Each structure stands twice: as structure tokens, then as C-alpha cells.
């Protein structure tokens, strides 16, 4: 309890400072897959054109005077970033301006040539998704060969000494829940060091598919699986930052739960909207780079993210753990009511 109290104090101070260190750029909403669980509901063609890199760079240039060089990581996401033919050039220019950069990818287009281009452009880190063994992953991603392409990407990363950081993420659902042990062994065999597990939020395409949600018992078993895997020490497995998990805090992650959306994490979305994590409902947008100064918005808005007292409603209203979770992850709050859609702590308590 003493450590939790210290963490809550630290979180309060971090919120007061709100120093940006992690900025998502939704560079495209186009994608080469059609995933069953896509939170962004991305397609091969999008009603939005890819954002011109110059627009993004102009928006973030004021950060160069506010923050130390290399202190703000740009995470390029989508859609699928690899569909942009200028991705490596974008990354190279970000490096020149003092921004380390990363991508989040499904790995389908990540071949040897792409790998060399991105490494040569100074890519700092990368996250690749693997959502099951071969048949399950391909069914989840709705494209045959997706598993083999992702595994090819994983092998390229695992054998690359010039890349500081990479990890693999798995979105856990009833479709792949029974394969967690098999996925773990596969990743260990392919020399993967870091593996993050997520559940699937009922947003985007996943909002219409109740079959993607783990039962309470499955969720508890997933927590126990992570605890066991961490004790084994063969791969650094952890639960994502999506939720407070009560008795499993610090057992399934390195530290206590902290939703940093709008506190140290921001985003510039495909239409120029300024928000926090891209998966958060667009009703929480704080401005737009085509009308507003990004740094001014970051410094002076974002009140719904930094004072979360408004989240104390619905199932959170009388919860004794509210002081520890502050209503949970922002992306799990419904657009209209603001109430939390899924409470992981209660899934463990029921």
C-alpha cells in the first residue's frame, strides 16, 4: 500500500508537469489487411488522404525549443505505416530534427528491403503484431499469409543488432486464448525478448463483435499466465497499460498502472486533430494542427485527460479503487455517457 501511495503521488506530479515524451502520428488510415478487431476500422482505401509529412513536421517544430533533443519519441501508426512510400524519408527527417521515431506495424510488408531502408533511416524501435498461430492469425487478419509475413518481420528484428528496441504485441480474445502457450514458445524459439498482451476494446470494428471479449475466468487465467511467464524469465511478458488490475499490479507489469494519455502521451490524427492515444474516441479531441498551435494546445488544454474526476460515474462512482485507477484507460470510456465500458478490476473481482 505504501508503494501504491507513492505511485499515486508520482502520478499527480507527472500530471502537473505533463511533459510530452511520446507522440503518435496517425500518418495514414489505409491498410493492407482487414483485421476483425481493428479499433480504427481501417481499409485499403480511406476517405482521408495520407497526411503530408510537411504538415506534421511543421506542427511539431515548436517542440524543438521546448524539449531536449531526442526526448520526444514519435510513434508512426495508422492504418498501416508501411503503405506509405515515403516512410523511410519521413523517419530520416525526424531524426535530423532530433526526434527518435518508431512504427507500429502488422508486419505484412516488412521484408528485407524494407528492413534495411528503415534501419538506415534511423528507426529507433518497432512493434509488430502477432495474434495467434498460423491459422488463427490469418483468420484474425483476414489475409492468408499474414502469419508468415509477420514471422519474417520478427526474425529480421530478432537478428538485428542496430535496432535498440522492438517488441511483439498480441491482442488476446477467445479466438487465440488457448494458443497463448504456443505463441510464447514460438516467440522464444525466434529469440524474441519482449511480448505485450492486450485485450480487445469494444471500439471501431470490434464494437460490433461481442465474441472478441474474454470472459472473466479467461481474463483471470491470462493474468496468471503472465505471472508464470514472468517468473520463468525466458521472455519479458507483460500486460499492457490498458487497465488497473488490483491484486495483479506489479506482478504483470514492471510498475503500477498509469494511463498517461494526455499527460505524457499525445497524438496528431489523420485529419490534423490533436488528441492523446489514437484509439480514444474523437469526441475528446483538443484542437487541430490546421487551426491551432500544437504546443499551445498541449500546454493549455487536455483538461479531460489531466483532471479525471469526471470519470467517477457509473460503476466507478462508488469504487474504492478509483484513487488507484482514476477510472481506467481513456479509450474504454463511452462517447456519449463517458462511463467505462469494461472494468478489468471488476472482471477480476466478480
Image (spheres, grey):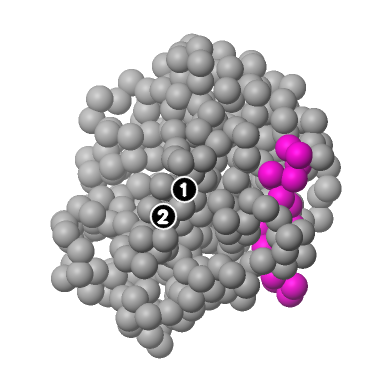
Residue 72 location, quadrant: bottom left
> Which sits in the foreground, 178 or 227?
227
Q: Quadrant of the C terminus?
A: top right
- Identified at 23% across, 74% down, the residue is 62
Identify the residue shown where x is 38% and y is 53%. Answer: 10
Q: Quadrant of residue 16?
A: bottom left
x and y percentages locating residue 174 in the rendered image: 78, 33
**Image height check: is 153 above or below 96?**
above
The answer to whether residue 176 is visible is no
Question: Furthest-front residue in view?
Answer: 2
Residue 284 seen in render: yes
Q: Is residue 347 magenta?
A: yes
Magenta: main secondary structure equals loop
Determine the residue positioned at 39% across, 40% down.
Answer: 126
Give me the residue at 33% from left, 21% from top: 159
Describe the element under mark 2 as helix, strand or loop: helix
Front residue of this view, candidates 109 and 307? 307
Amino acid at each position: 500500500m505504501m508503494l501504491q501511495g507513492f505511485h499515486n503521488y508520482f502520478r499527480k506530479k507527472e500530471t502537473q508537469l505533463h511533459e510530452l515524451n511520446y507522440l503518435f502520428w496517425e500518418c495514414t488510415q489505409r491498410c493492407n489487411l482487414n483485421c476483425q478487431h481493428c479499433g480504427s476500422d481501417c481499409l485499403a482505401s480511406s476517405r482521408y488522404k495520407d497526411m503530408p509529412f510537411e504538415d506534421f513536421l511543421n506542427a511539431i517544430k515548436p517542440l524543438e525549443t521546448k524539449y531536449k533533443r531526442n526526448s520526444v519519441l514519435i510513434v508512426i501508426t495508422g492504418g498501416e505505416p508501411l503503405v506509405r512510400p515515403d516512410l523511410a524519408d519521413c523517419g530520416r527527417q525526424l531524426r535530423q530534427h532530433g526526434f527518435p521515431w518508431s512504427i507500429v506495424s502488422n508486419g505484412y510488408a516488412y521484408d528485407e528491403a524494407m528492413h534495411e531502408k528503415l534501419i538506415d533511416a534511423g528507426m529507433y524501435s518497432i512493434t509488430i503484431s502477432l495474434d495467434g498461430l498460423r491459422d488463427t492469425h490469418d483468420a484474425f487478419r483476414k489475409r492468408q499469409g499474414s502469419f508468415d509475413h509477420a514471422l519474417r518481420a520478427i526474425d529480421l528484428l530478432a537478428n538485428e543488432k542496430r535496432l535498440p528496441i522492438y517488441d511483439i504485441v498480441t491482442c488476446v480474445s477467445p479466438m487465440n486464448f488457448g494458443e497463448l502457450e504456443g505463441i510464447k514458445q514460438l516467440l522464444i524459439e525466434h529469440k524474441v525478448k519482449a511480448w505485450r498482451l492486450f485485450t480487445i476494446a469494444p471500439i471501431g470494428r470490434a464494437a460490433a463483435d461481442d465474441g472478441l471479449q474474454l470472459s472473466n475466468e479467461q481474463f483471470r487465467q491470462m493474468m496468471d499466465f503472465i505471472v508464470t511467464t514472468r517468473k520463468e524469465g525466458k521472455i519479458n511478458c507483460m500486460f499492457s497499460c490498458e487497465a488497473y488490475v488490483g491484486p495483479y499490479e506489479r506482478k504483470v507489469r514492471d510498475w503500477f498502472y498509469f494511463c498517461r494519455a494526455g499527460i505524457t502521451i499525445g497524438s496528431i490524427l489523420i485529419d490534423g486533430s490533436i488528441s492523446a492515444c489514437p484509439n480514444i474516441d474523437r469526441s475528446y479531441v483538443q484542437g487541430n494542427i490546421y487551426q491551432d498551435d500544437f504546443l499551445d494546445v498541449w500546454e493549455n488544454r487536455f483538461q479531460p485527460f489531466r483532471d479525471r474526476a469526471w470519470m467517477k460515474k457509473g460503476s466507478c462512482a462508488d469504487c474504492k479503487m478509483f484513487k488507484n485507477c482514476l477510472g481506467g484507460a481513456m479509450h474504454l470510456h463511452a462517447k456519449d455517457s463517458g462511463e467505462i465500458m469494461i472494468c478489468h478490476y471488476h472482471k477480476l473481482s466478480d
